[in-house]
Amino acid sequence: MYRERPSTLGGGAVLWTRTAAPVAGPALVLPDGCMDLIWREGDGAAGFLVAGPDTRAQRDAGRPGTAWTGLRFAPGTGPAVLGVPARELRDQRVPLDALWPGARVRRLAERVAEAADRGAALEELAARTRTPGRLGRELHPAVARALAAGRSVADVAREAGLSERQLHRRSLDAFGYGPKTLARILRFQRALERARAGRPPAEVAAVTGYADQAHLAREVRALAGVPLGTLLRGPG
């Protein structure tokens, strides 16, 4: 079972929980431009995991009863909490002690494990850790919003006061990939949201910037690894 709510951190962060069902297969995690700090419990063990920004769908497996509590950071905001450029974690799942000193992670793990509310404990951890600008001048969230709205990379760079090359370099650190890839992923998410709302594929393709329905179908397969119809039927 999966649930989510807006995080008290603000800035587009989302707090989510998931428990592996007895008969369900691995969960399909779709690329969305985000990074996650995750607390995992199951099989008599618990610990932190960091999920980097994905360029393709990932399948997260877990034994029945395994529970995850995660903080999903909006595109471009994760590095300020994790202290690592997003490009270094692209398409990866790594334990937190691979990024932070082991002794520190053990202390934090004890604190979260003892907390009555795992989600609130994660939010507190992130709030204390977040240091805007620690990796250099951050890209304004307006960059991600403009790309999500379908603006061209040239327009976004100009409005940010950057050359396209500068925007690309800063995007690698902030988002994990260049602005063209981020725009592609955000367009996919925008299309999926409309399709899940019941809009026909041809209409979805037209209003979200795809050349046609066939183009939409190719992009869904490339990013999700499965056809649009499979995504709309639910977890597989």
Image (tube, grey):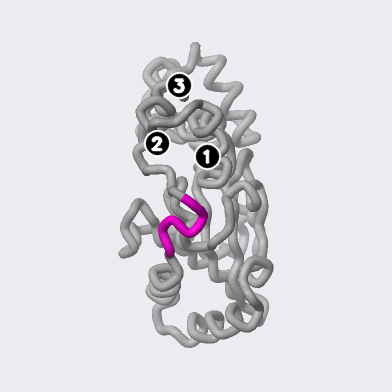
Q: Which residue is mark 3?
A: 154
Q: Is residue 74 left or right of residue 28?
A: left
The secondary element bearing badge 1 is classed as helix
Q: Which residue is mark 2?
A: 143
Is residue 207 something that shows in the picture? yes
Q: Is residue 49 left or right of residue 16?
A: right
Residue displayed at 59% across by 78% down: 105
Quarter holding residue 200: top left
**Numbered disc total:** 3
The secondary element bearing badge 2 is classed as helix
What amino acid type is highlighted by mark number 3?
Ala
Magenta segment boundaries in residue numbering: 131-136
Q: CA distance from mark 2 to mark 1?
A: 9 Å
Contact between marks 2 and 3 (CB within 8 A): the answer is: no
What amino acid type is highlighted by mark number 2?
Val
Q: Which residue is mark 1?
A: 171
Contact between marks 2 and 1 (CB within 8 A): the answer is: yes
What amino acid type is highlighted by mark number 1?
Ser
Q: Relative to the observer, which residue lies in front, 157 or 204?
A: 157
Mark found first going from the N terminus, 2 or 3:
2
Q: Is residue 133 left or right of residue 229?
A: left
Residue displayed at 65% across by 47% down: 91
Position of residue 120 measured from the top left corner of the image (x, y, whole percent): 38, 74
Position of residue 87 measured from the top left corner of the image (x, y, whole percent): 62, 47
Residue displayed at 43% across by 43% down: 139
Residue displayed at 57% across by 63% down: 21
Q: Is residue 133 magenta?
A: yes
